[in-house]
Amino acid sequence: MDRKICPDCKRKYALEDDTCIDCGSKLIVEEVLDPGEWLIAYHEIVRENVDTIAADLAAHGVEGRVRYIDLSKFNVSLTSTSTWALLVPKENAEAAAETLHKLYGYTEEAEEEDIEALGEEYGFLQAPVDELAGDESKWPMLCGAIRDTDLPGSLAEKARDALIAAGADAEENVLQALDSEIREDHYATRTWSFELLIEILGEIGTQHTVARLLNLCADEDSTVRINALHCLGALGSADHAEALLPLLEDPDADVRQEADTALEALTGAPAFPEYILSAADGKAARDAWEKALDARRE
């Protein structure tokens, strides 16, 4: 099955459409990949890095497809988080894993070299995960490490694991870090650290997390509203869907589109079965979502 998609803003359309009504780009046909037949070989928020991995695997005989996907639809044990991913056919998953390990295998020696290269500031990351998790004074440092774009991925993941192990007690520290990301990070270029913080809160967050994000949806800065909606799509539930309806009529078209995407993530299905409605007509989108939510209650 195929669909049309805008190559620039990634909005999805029916096959009979030709032009994106939001940005004017010519639509392209995209193959829809069945989660039952395709598996994630690698994923992260930076498209260029995923393209590099895809090219390296292809050079070793493992072909795949690079897509911007909702991880939860591909059986990843996270709440609904969207990111760039390299997908491979199910029968090639083992070969992809072996090739990735051969090309990018990470050792304890390499971790020590990374810490040494980063200097004294990150020496604390030499401690075991459980020790970092049990030391409250280290939680802000772990959040700061995650937000450092120069930190090697393996160390960012170690910081992530420590904060998840710390549990809900570390929630406020992670929320403060995410708040900074939401205010500083443009929605079109979200960093891996942004997504890691969402992942952590998906494991340890409480209703306090969702309440904070809902408040940010009323911020005067449209970028803050967009980023807050992105987080809500990952961390909220269907119970929060109604609170997002007014944002479908936001003055900013990107906010309207992100609200539509968040509602789809929260409810598990779009209001429109064929394709995601373009954000150009906010009232039509709100009317359709109100009907969809009413139908879910019946």
Image: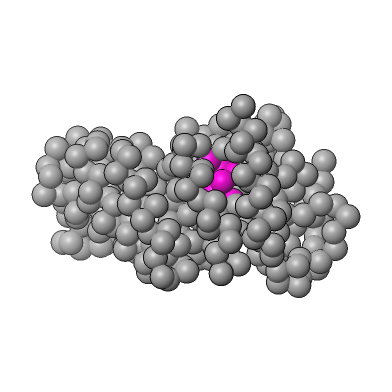
The foreground one among 146 and 41 is 146
Q: In this rendering, would 211 be left or right of 234?
A: left
On screen, 42 above or below 192? above
Q: Which picture quadrant has residue 129?
A: top left
Q: Which picture quadrant has residue 64?
A: top right
Q: In this rendering, would 64 be left or right of 158?
A: right
Q: Position of residue 186 (x, y in %)?
A: 46, 68
> What residue is drawn where x is 16% and y is 61%?
120
Picture quarter with the C terminus = top right
Magenta-drawn stretch contains 199: no
- Magenta range: 261-266
Q: Position of residue 105 (x, y in %)?
A: 44, 43
Q: In this rendering, would 203 be left or right of 5?
A: left
Picture quarter with the N terminus = top right
Give the farthest residue toward the right: 16
Q: Position of residue 35 (x, y in %)?
A: 67, 34
The foreground one among 51 and 165 is 165
Q: How is the image coloured?
A: one colour
Q: Which picture quadrant has residue 24?
A: bottom right
- For residue 239, say whether it is visible: yes
Q: Position of residue 147 (x, y in %)?
A: 32, 60
How many marks the image carries: the answer is 0
The foreground one among 158 and 101 is 158
> What residue is drawn where x is 19% and y is 54%?
140
> What residue is drawn where x is 82% and y is 46%?
2
- For residue 96, say whether it is visible: no
Magenta: main secondary structure: helix
